[in-house]
Image (cartoon, rainbow, N blue to C red):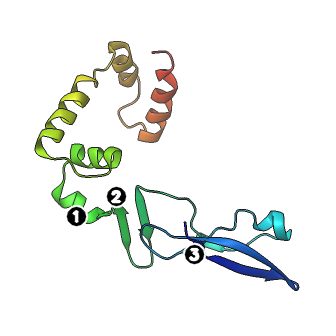
Amino acid sequence: MTDKTATLGIEGTNHNFPVLEGSVGPEVVDIRKFYGETGAFTYDPGFTSTASCQSAITYIDGEKGILLHRGYPIDQLAENSTFMEVSYLLLHGELPKKNELDEFTYTISRHTMLHEQLATFYRGFRRDAHPMAIMCGVVGALSAF
């Protein structure tokens, strides 16, 4: 966070709002209190000038075609990294070294056993069922396990 502020005015009144620095990309004006201070809403159809959240994991700039995960371009991760490496990256903030990846992979593989009754539950879906319908059903069923 910087000490910068942005002044926005409505009908002769001025209100100061903090300016925040992103880890990547342009600065943003924090207008969370805009409605409370001005009684007005902002209008930005399609979120073309609005940051929807603060994230240390992902950065998106659709106009420039940029999608970063923890600072790495998604195309580089897709081409050069395994699923387990990207999982480690998202959880820990950096790509793993060989020994870190080996330990992480071992830990994950030791905790991925599926209860036989849940496997039976999966087999109850038609083979052409939509994946989202299966996910909704299985996530709901997990509370029973």
Q: Which residue is mark 2?
A: 70
Residue 130 in view (yes/no): no
- Cα–Cα span, label 3 and label 1: 26 Å
Q: Quadrant of residue 100?
A: top left
N-terminal label among 3 and 1:
3
Any mark on residue 76, and which? 1
Please indicate whether residue 77 sits to the left or right of residue 131 in the image: left
N-terminal label among 3 and 2:
3
> Which amino acid type corresponds to the residue marked 3 in the rendered image?
Thr
Camera-side mark, 1 or 2: 2
Residue 31 on image: x %, y %: 69, 68
Camera-side mark, 3 or 2: 2
Q: Residues within 10 Å of mark 1 (few under 14, many from 20)?
A: few
For the N terminus, which image quadrant? bottom right
Residue 107 on image: x %, y %: 23, 28
Q: Quadrant of residue 28?
A: bottom right
Task: Name the residue: 26% across, 49% down.
Answer: 86
The one of 123 and 86 positioned closer to us in this rendering: 86
Residue 54 on image: x %, y %: 53, 59
> Which amino acid type corresponds to the residue marked 1 in the rendered image?
Gln
Indicate the secondary structure of the residue bearing disc 3. Answer: loop
Task: Name the residue: 66% across, 74% down.
Answer: 44
Q: Which residue is mark 3?
A: 48
Task: Name the residue: 52% across, 26% down.
Answer: 140
